[in-house]
Amino acid sequence: MAEIPDITIEVTNLRKSYGPLSAVNDISFKVRRGEIIGLLGPNGAGKSTTMRILTGYLPATSGSVRICGLPVASQPEETKRFVGYMPENNPLPEDMRVSEYLWFRGRLKEMPRAKLRSRIDEVLELCDLKRNRHRIIGRLSKGNKQRVGIAEAILSEPAVIIMDEPTIGLDPHQIIIVRDLIASLRGRMSVIISSHILPEIEATCDRVLIINSGRIVAEGSPTELRHEIFGHTSYRMEFAGDATALAGHLAAIEATLKPVSIGEPDPDGFQVATLMTNSAPDLGEALLTGLPTNGYRIRSLGRTQPSLEDVFLAATRRSWDARLPDKKPLQGDNRAPLPKA
Amino acid sequence: MRHYFTILSQEIRALLFSPITYVTAVLFLLVMGGIFTVILDDYSKQAQEVSPAVNFFASFWIPVFFMVPLLTMKTFAEERRMGTLETLLTSPVSTGEVVLGKFSAAYLFYLLLWGATASFHYILHVYAKDIRFLDSGPLLGGYLFVAVSGLLFVSIGVLASALTRSYEVAAILTFTILFTLIFGFRFLGQTNAMNTEFLHPFKSTVEALQIFNHVEDFAHGVVDTRQMFFYVTGSVLTLIFSVLAVEYKTLNS
């Protein structure tokens, strides 16, 4: 197998339409070796379609996909060797035994017999399936089936692993196991997983692509996304002191810092205030040292993180708003235009 | 073609583990045994012109109608329904290899089941102790016909299965196509309309497509290359259509 390049997946201006319905609308992104990417989007956003095009199962309407430098459209047989794919709902033959199935798949993926035998042991160990290796797949629990699907995807040590909703329908305990399994692949293989379960993606992925209506509406690490979408940071503070003069003192600390809401004082005289700022650096220390000199007493101070859930909702809503006047994205810009807040 | 044997062995395994295969085998041997007994019964009552093998192979259509749909209906319909076709086609195999592998497995079973009927003739030979009953010419010709025509029949089943995700539909479709092929042309050849001036050019074509005439020729030891050519090219064409059907259906999935 050829040397794996630094960029394992390169998608440019990918479009896919089913008749008048466009499922994927001008998506471009790159995945580096060893990165774990999360595709996030509501149902019907085009996640599965994008993944199917990456695997060569579906042809794209236009645009190009390169896996390890090779175009999927003209050399599907070569690119399929680089990809381990677990489709949505993880279809498995019900009547085969786990080890038989892995053997069959390994042979199809052109693994030599001698290597395959030891690799199956390794994969079963990795996915914690050793005890179930001789069991019939149809009789396994859902979590175990899911692990068989993952074992199959990583079997031939492909450069790219694509998993469509790997944790769907699992209980929290199984989700953690699957998540750890995916995290253990970091650095060795490029992994793309799709999900609409946000904590999932947040816990495992280095980078998140939020897709809505076939477009990438936001892209970046979870932290970057929070800042990009909201553009402000908020703090929650419990203080005692003159609430009316607070705004002035806060502006002295940082120009854009202002109280958004101030609650009623409790019996001890402490009030809860929510503060908001446009500045990215942490203002915690400045607040803790600055306010007491002005006669305020502070009981607690915390920076409130918008969850990825908020980011997701904001991003998908934003793209929905942006789509209403049906603006075309600018050349080379695959994001929907940002409405000015 | 490096994946052909992997897929073939997988398909044979799937057939061996499927209860439908055993139902088919039992039903087939029961029906064929019954037919053979009836034929022998006739022979015991009065002298006949041809050897029992000729009459035996003339009833080839009875098992074909239920056996081919039962053996082939699951090939693609099941994979499509389960979704495993997606994993299969995203591994580095070509659709041609998949179609050929599945076809070969079903065809091998078809041959195997027909092969089992050879024991009927052997048993007859052992018990009757009469060399005339083991007439090698009609037997060889008959089994050759079964082998060659089976190519076309089984590939029709594979095509029908590739067209749908439900195997009930696949089975009924296979039966319909086989029925049209075997009885439709016979019926067409017997209609008076074929004797009109206008349809005269088609008359010889329809004559040549009479599968009942083929089996009679083969069973009498006449091996016509034109008939062989018909079955072989017919099955190749059907398999090509199956590849196209599988690819077309995934394009629009």
Image (cartoon, coloured by chain):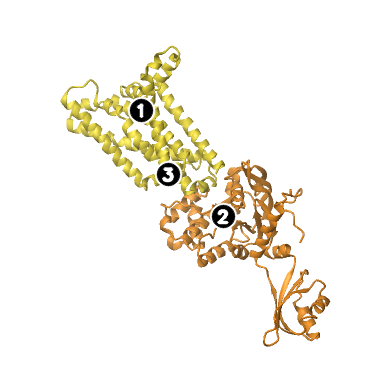
Residue found 76% across the figure and 69% down from its top: A280
Residue A78 appears in the rendering: yes
Quarter residue A288 falls in: bottom right
Left or right: B97 as drawn, with respect to B27? right
Q: Name the residue carrying label 3.
A: B11
Query: Which chain is represented by orange in the image?
Result: A
Q: Residue at x 40, y 44 (%)?
A: B12
Instruction: Tell me residue B20's x, y (percent).
Output: 35, 44
- Give how far across and how far down residue A123 sits, in percent: 51, 59
Evaluate whether label 3 is on the same chain as label 2: no
Residue type of the residue flagged with mark 1 = Phe
Determine contact: label 1, label 2, CB under 8 Å: no
Disc 1 or disc 2, which is closer to the eye?
2
- Which residue is drawn at the image coordinates 66% and 59% (left, top)? A208
Toward which corner of the image does residue A75 lie, by quadrant? top right
Q: Choose between B241 and A43: the one closer to the eye.
A: A43
Numbered disc 3: secondary structure: helix
Q: Is residue B118 left or right of residue A18?
A: left
Which residue in the structure is indicated by mark 1? B145
Q: What separation in Å lies between label 3 and label 2 (alpha carbons)? A: 27 Å
Q: Are marks 3 and 1 on the same chain?
A: yes
Amino acid under disc 3: Glu
Q: Residue furthest left?
A: B45
